[in-house]
Amino acid sequence: QVQLAESGGGSVQPGGSLRLSCAASGFTFSGYYFSWIRQAPGKGLEWISFISSSGHYANYADSVKGRFTVSRDNAKNSLYLQMNSLRAEDSAVYYCARESGGFDTWGQGTLVTVSS
Amino acid sequence: HSVLTQPPSASGTPGQRVTISCSGSSSDVGSNSVNWYQHLPRMAPKLLIDSNNQRPSGVPDRFSGSKSGTSASLTISGLQSEDEADYYCAAWDASLGGFWVFGGGTKLTVL
């Protein structure tokens, strides 16, 4: 069945880096755009980045622009989010989501905690 | 990037009808389709309404969506206890390279 599974979350100090991964299965990964969406504790959903099906185009929310980089490897059916210069306010559950009109498939999320 | 405006909370008793509003701007809701998501605690969000008023397979017909101008709404008819969740609207904004914007979320309580 159609599935997304995030990994790579954890605890990191302010200023540190993490790389999240999202493994896809059950569908033709290369045919879809994907987004990363996060939810900070007690807050709502926040879209942070999308990447085109080819990987040639991406965009970011102002809150992460210049610090986060999204990428994908269509041969490996995987999506990535490189997060640098992390701040306390980046602490959140990070979801990858497939775009098909709306976000029709979501992973279970991976928790990122930025704290000293 | 702006956030779509939703009421922070809504409530109803079993069997009632509840409507959640979502207000945006000409560049997001006014120009593109609105999607609605249901987010249960400790679960992944679920697409509830696609393209303003389309229910994905498996979504009960108690859930319906509509849009007019820069506003949209989600209506839940015949409210059930399992509908207690957070609900989010979202829309695409093609300006500034393109981005998605979410509403702040509405916590629905079934009394």
Image (cartoon, coloured by chain):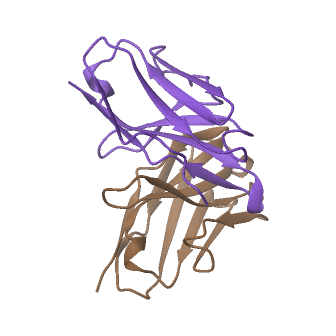
Q: What quarter of the picture does the C terminus of chain B occupy? A: top left
Residue B65 is situated, as x and y percent measured from the top left of the image, at 56, 23
Q: Nearer the viewer, residue B93 or A67?
A: B93
Q: Does residue A68 appear to the left or right of B6 in the view shown?
A: right
Q: From what the image shows, is residue A103 above or below residue B61? A: below
Q: From what the image shows, is residue A77 above or below residue B69? A: below
Residue lying at 43% horizontally and 86% vertically, measured from the top left: A16
Q: Does residue A29 appear to the left or right of B95 in the view shown?
A: left
Q: Does residue B105 appear to the left or right of B54 in the view shown?
A: left
Q: What quarter of the picture does the N terminus of chain B occupy? A: bottom right
Residue A85 is situated, as x and y percent measured from the top left of the image, at 49, 85
Residue lying at 50% horizontally and 56% vertically, measured from the top left: A46
Q: What colour has chain A? A: brown
Q: Residue A87's quadrant in the figure?
A: bottom left
Q: State how many labels appear.
A: 0
Q: What colour has chain B? A: purple
Residue lying at 59% horizontally and 56% vertically, measured from the top left: B2
Q: Nearer the viewer, residue B19 or A116?
A: B19
Q: Does residue B41 appear to the left or right of B101 in the view shown?
A: left
Residue lying at 44% horizontally and 88% vertically, measured from the top left: A15
Residue B78 is situated, as x and y percent measured from the top left of the image, at 36, 12
User: Is any part of residue B84 visible from this angle?
Assistant: yes
Q: Residue B70's quadrant in the figure?
A: top right
Residue B3 is situated, as x and y percent measured from the top left of the image, at 54, 52
Looking at the image, the residue that sits furthest to the left is B111
User: Is any part of residue A1 visible from this angle?
Assistant: no
